[in-house]
Image: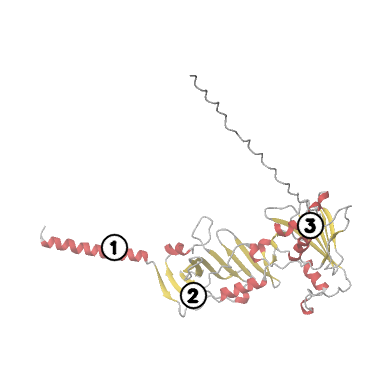
Amino acid sequence: MNSRQLTLILVVAVVLGAIGWVLFHRGTRSWETQPAAGDGKVIEFPLNDVAHITIKDATGEVNLARKADVWVVRERADYPAKFEQVSRFLQKVWNLEPVQTLQVGPSQLGRFDLIEPAKDTKTSGTLLELKNKDDKRVAALLVGKQYLKKSNQSFGPGEFPAGRYVMPKNNVKRVALISDPLSDLVTKPERWLDRDFIKIEKPKSIALVGDTPEKQWKLVRENESAEWQFADPEPGEELDNTKAQPLASSISSFNFTDVLDPQTKLENPSTVTIETVDGFTYTLKIGPLKGETYPMTVSVEAKPSAPATPTPNDKPEEEKKSPAEKLAKEKKFEGRPFLIAKFAVEQLLKNRADLIKTEPSPTPTPSEPVASPKPPVRSSPKVPPTPKAKP
């Protein structure tokens, strides 16, 4: 091989190497970052025109709709959604601005979880659609994976969500990194429900009627500071107030975890009736335990009562609601089963025997320890005398 051929081979090798280097880096850099200054908002839409919000991912879907100026959750038979939560979320989306933009090719969208939701796709994101009263789309946003940032603290998790990758659905393949992780973008309907519920205050009687004789009892007290007693004690039967007090306290903070369809019927429910000093009567129908919750329905009645003697625990006058206002508000919870956490209900379903005061068992008197027998003293065997020798 002469020098000319060797030179030609080296030139070809250099050219091929350069082409390979360019192709390699073009593949690995199929997306490029650009400064976000002047880009404005991520999506533009008329905020006040939004009347329907759809959030969909690979696991489910939730639809929030505005009906007569009230936001409702369609997947929960139009149960009211929490207005402040929906309003705050819409305002946040309307104000989203990119901190960085990326030009991303279609083949790279999966790296950011920016594929439209599909049950068989692990890299799919969350699709947010905003529609008007005619159910026409006014804006849509594909929300991908969260941007994780390393923590500077020596303890705690190494990374935390500091933003999220999003892409407007307007036929422009432009990915934006925003500074909000959008942790409140969820498809679980129960997470959007209005959690307001009945408030049972100043109970004066609590009665249980269950399906067995053991679940038949009624507790009463004369006033808020008095101790609870059985309304119909058996001879020698005394209520244990250390057990009755937690039972009475449990009804003051009812919260539900979810709501069921209004057509759902409770099977063989127990009935708890609670009367308050203010003249309210609450009737709770409680169905069998399912998982970690009890299904429960509520009905409320009220009749005027004499003004109660003020106590130090009373609310200020400006915070109090009139009986009519309170009744009208709590009547709205009738006709639909709620799911109540197990720990909040099981106190009301105690057996009568579990509420009775029991006498403590007498402490046994310690007996004197029995002395161990002494081992017998063993004497050494006697050695016979040595016989004298005969002469």
Query: Which residue position is annotated with label 3?
Result: 285
Q: Secondary structure at mark 2?
A: strand
Between 141 and 378, the one nearer to me in the picture: 378
Residue 164 pos. (x, y %): 50, 69
Residue shown at the point (72%, 56%) measured from the top left: 294
Q: How many marks?
A: 3
Q: Please, which residue is most extreme toward the left here? A: 2
Q: CA distance from mark 1 to mark 2?
A: 35 Å
Q: Amino acid under label 2?
A: Pro
Work out whether residue 260 can be spotted: no
Instruction: Indicate the secondary structure of the residue bearing disc 1.
Output: helix
* Relative image position of residue 112 (x, y in whole percent): 47, 64
**Circle 1: residue type:** Gly
Residue at position x 76%, y 51% from top?
363
Q: Mark 3 or mark 1: name the one nearer the start of the chain.
A: 1
Residues at marks 3 and 2, CA–CA distance in whole angstroms: 51 Å
Q: What's the distance in space between the residues labelled 3 and 1, CA to CA? A: 74 Å
Which residue is at the front of the view, 97 or 117? 97
Instruction: Name the residue rendered at 52%, 63% in the picture.
Output: 125
Towards the viewer: 68 or 248: 248
| Disc 1: which residue | 20
Residue 244 found in image quarter: bottom right
The image quadrant that residue 272 belongs to is bottom right
Q: What label does residue 134 carry, if any?
A: none
Q: Nearer the viewer, mark 3 or mark 2?
A: 3
Query: Disc 3 vs disc 1: Cβ atoms closer than 8 Å?
Result: no
Q: Hey, which quadrant is residue 371 in on the image?
A: top right
Circle 3: is it few (<14), some (14-19), or many (20+) Cα within 10 Å? many
Q: Amino acid at mark 3?
A: Lys
Q: Circle 3 — which element?
A: strand
